[in-house]
Amino acid sequence: MKLLFSLIVSCTISISTTAFAGSSGTKVALVPGGPHPYFAAWEKAGKDAVKDFGLGKADYKVPAEWDLSQQNELIESLVGKGYNAVLVFPGDAVGTNKILGELDDAGIPTAALAGCVEQPTKAKMCFGTDTGHSAYLGTKQLIKAMGGKGKIAHFTGFLVDPNTTLRINAVEKAVAEAGGGVEIIQVIADIDAYEPADEKINAFMAAQGGEVDGIVTTAWVPAVVASQALTNMGDKRIKMVGIDHDEVVLKAIKEGYVHGTMLQNPYGQGYIGSYVMDKIRGGCVFKANAPWKSTAQTDQFIDSGTVFVDITDVDTYVDAMRGISLDILKTFDGTYLDC
Amino acid sequence: MTITLQTLLKKDWFGLLIVVILSGILITLFKPAFLSSFNLYVLMVSTSYMLIIALAQMIIISIGQMNLSVGAIGGLVAISFSGVMEVYHLSVPLAIFIGLAIGVICGFLNGFITVKSGISAFIITLATLYIFKGINLGITEAEPFYEIPSAVKNFGNAKIGGTPIPYLIIIPIIITVLMWVLMNRTETGRHMLAYGNSVQSAELLGISSSKVVITAHVISGTLAAVAGMLVVCRLQLGTPNIGDSWLLPSFAAPVIGGAILAGGKVDVIATSLGVLIVAIISQALVIFKIDPFFVQIFLGLMILLAVFINRYREYKQEASRKVFTHD
């Protein structure tokens, strides 16, 4: 499904972007924090960026584990092999800045992709989902589906993920705005691996499944495992809003066990991110008055887009993401760059 | 043989059994849902594959070594098992055979390289961890396999009759019994413990070091393979992340169960109870709504406590050896 998603989005965007194609010696390394299906679309995005924008290379390279030192070692080895631009999902919101500074000193442009690093940073931008806003909107959708009242649980990912705190705060904000009718009864975090997620989510369902009215998940693995748990239980009373486009989540939406999901745009991140790195290497700079967004971590943030999908549009969600990517790309130069 | 309280108190597992019972009672007093049918099912499911993972590490600890690649083997087998069913449409029995074969080969490589190189298994399995994980990522490119046959999914999620007992726990129970027999009633098990206790003494007794080390690693690899396939049954997908979180629990349960990391002493029943204790603590952290930012502190304290207890046991055993030598 994800492959199909990437193919459809990439074909459409490629047709629309042939005018951008050029020729350059830019060799982009796209480095996630560790192995995770969310980032898989970056590989296709990099290949398409090479084809459409004439980049020398744009390769997806995965560290063997979610470990900052391993990620740093991988980046160093890639630079040693000739990569001259790096797009990285920060292994640590602060710790990643050290290597980004070293790369900048060596004249290698970098950007944080899908997650931001804390300022001050040498990253040229942070291009990703406004995770806090996505979690906020998802929780709003959940509260609406619950009829504006009830008890909810929040399942989220790695505590070291820079996005996790933002998501926890955003869910709390949406609940606070519900006017006292909604209560968060539990936050379960650090379950972005399948085995602990399965154990803890099912333990929660066993202990408190009877009293919880809604579940919001703001990380990939918890969304998959919670969708599976509700499907296995045959429970349609508990409303759930997930995140991302894993097959398990989409199937649960179609079957009515999950209310909806907040889609992110990993393909657009890799594709447009590679394009921007090439532009920076070609001499472009970000405008002094670029309309950056601010997050808790940075004030040089560009939103790669998010959209809520439920049973009514789960079959056509690709169109929505394609539209967002095209819109960003069409206006990027004029909005953000001085070339 | 008459079983008295005195003899029971000498068993490593007896104290742990008391801990399990007391913690179960304590949690139930505050949260009666702990003993609900669904919760017991969840507890047994999470115990099932962790039990095999712990036994896979325990057998390596018994020979005084460590296997850092347990999770990487399990992950590689998991994606191979699910991958051959999805991509090549192989039957479930054939996929199981391939999974087991990969586990055996990985374990054999660990043991063979350790024996032939003379380098610590810690370093060898650290290296193979990256190799096995690298193969995993090379095959999957971090993408899960989703097309799992219904029979496999059902096995991982169904209960026996109207009971809360999952089918998933049948294989771990059988393996636990077989492991108990291996370690307590067979020459191979005794040789492993003798080797773990003292390599020199074992060799003087004519025990083949190569055979012991390779056998232990092959069994460990096979058990990791079984655990990997059970996780696929449970999750209903073969994801490359399977096994990533196994390393710490694989050591925690044997150590809590009284295993001496230097080798020569392991207890299958106590290790099983160690798994149960870790699962109960994990559940309790959820049930009592511990703040997610403090969960790791509680788990860390538990591991630290287990290590201190183990160190104390080693110290006592060391002291008794000295007394024996002086006599």
Image: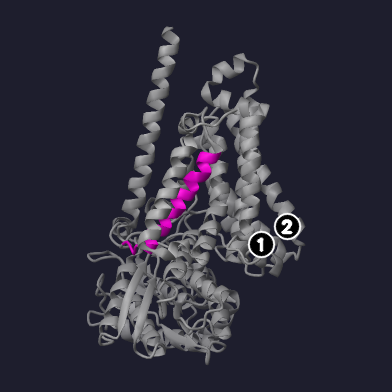
Cβ–Cβ below 8 Å for labels 2 and 1? yes
Disc 2 residue type (three-letter): Ala
Which quarter of the figure has residue B209?
top right
The main secondary structure of the magenta stretch is helix
The image position of residue B196, as x and y in percent, is 54, 26
The image position of residue A331, as x and y in percent, is 38, 87
Residue drawn at x 53%, y 20% is B198
Q: Which residue is mark 1?
A: B82
Residue A227 on the magenta span: no
- For the record, the magenta segment spans B269-290
Residue drawn at x 44%, y 48% is B20
Mark positioned earlier in the residue sequence (2 or 1): 1
- Label 1 crowd bin: few (<14), some (14–19), many (20+), radius 10 Å: many
Q: Is residue A76 visible?
A: no
Q: State the SS at label 2.
A: helix
Q: Is residue B172 above or below residue B41?
A: above
The image position of residue B153, as x and y in percent, is 65, 67
Q: Which residue is mark 2?
A: B95
Left or right, A141 with reference to B94: left
Separation of disc 2 and disc 1 at Cα? 8 Å
Question: On the rendered image, what quadrant is the N terminus of chain B found in?
Answer: top right
Subunit under mark 1: B
